[in-house]
Image (spheres, rainbow, N blue to C red):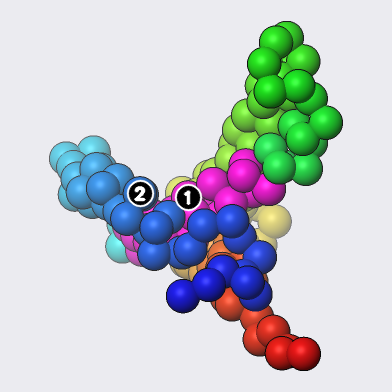
Amino acid sequence: RSLTGQKAMLPYRGMLWLYLNSLPYWLSCATSSRTRGKPGHLQVTQCIYIVACVFCWYPLKCAAAMEFGRRFATGARSIGPGAVAAYAAVGVVVAALGTAWTSLAYELPQSIGRGEWRGLGVEDWHGVPVAVLINGLACAAAMWVYWPRRVAWA
């Protein structure tokens, strides 16, 4: 099948096979002795983050890196210091996006669930809807990037 209408450079199935091997790691983190004693709402926010990470965020981050590389590194020569700087800049931007997303999608719901926001009137269980909302945005973005568009035939 052609990728004519897709926004991403590679199909979602290819990206999923690339990152599906991280699922056992994340599941072992979720069932480790450090997380077994946590309250249920903290475990739920962690599971939401794991599913969104493997099925949405990793493929989305890879598509963003390919798109940034295609757009910004195209003007650089294929070899030499200019190409190295262009590809390093793409890597830094994508890594910064990953750090920001992890802070929003994992750290924020976890801190709400630990009770660090009680002074603002936020209860511990509010971390779950926040995790659903933020990780749902990543899933919606992944669907937008990988969903094939209909192409009008001339």
Q: Which residue is mark 2?
A: 18
Which is nearer the eye, 122 or 28? Answer: 28
* Left or right of 111, for residue 20: left
* Quarter where residue 145 is shown: bottom right
The residue nearer to you, when weighing 1 against 38, is: 1
Specify whether residue 49 is painted magenta.
yes
Q: With 128 as the anchor, is 154 left or right in this view?
A: right
Residue at figure coordinates x 61%, y 33% from the top left: 95
Tell me which residue sits at (68%, 48%) in the image. Answer: 67
Judge the density around disc 2: few (<14), some (14-19), many (≥20) Cα neighbours within 10 Å: few
Q: Is residue 108 above or below residue 83?
A: below
Residue 48 in sight in this render: no
Q: Residues within 10 Å of mark 1 (few under 14, many from 20)?
A: many
| Residue at image mark 1 | 58
**Residue 107 location (% of width, % of height):** 53, 45
SS class, disc 1: helix
Q: Is residue 140 inside the magenta stretch?
A: no
Q: CA distance from mark 2 to mark 1?
A: 9 Å
Callout 2, which amino acid?
Answer: Leu
Residue for point 65% across, 80% down: 149
Q: Residue furthest right?
A: 75
The magenta span reads: 43-67
In the image, residue 75 sits, relative to residue 59, either above or below, namely above
Type of the residue with mark 1? Tyr
Residue 132 showing in the rendered view: yes
Q: Are dots 2 and 1 in contact, CB under 8 Å?
A: yes
Note whether 36 is above or below 12 in the view shown.
Answer: above
User: What label does residue 152 carry, if any?
Assistant: none
The first of marks 2 and 1 along the sequence is 2
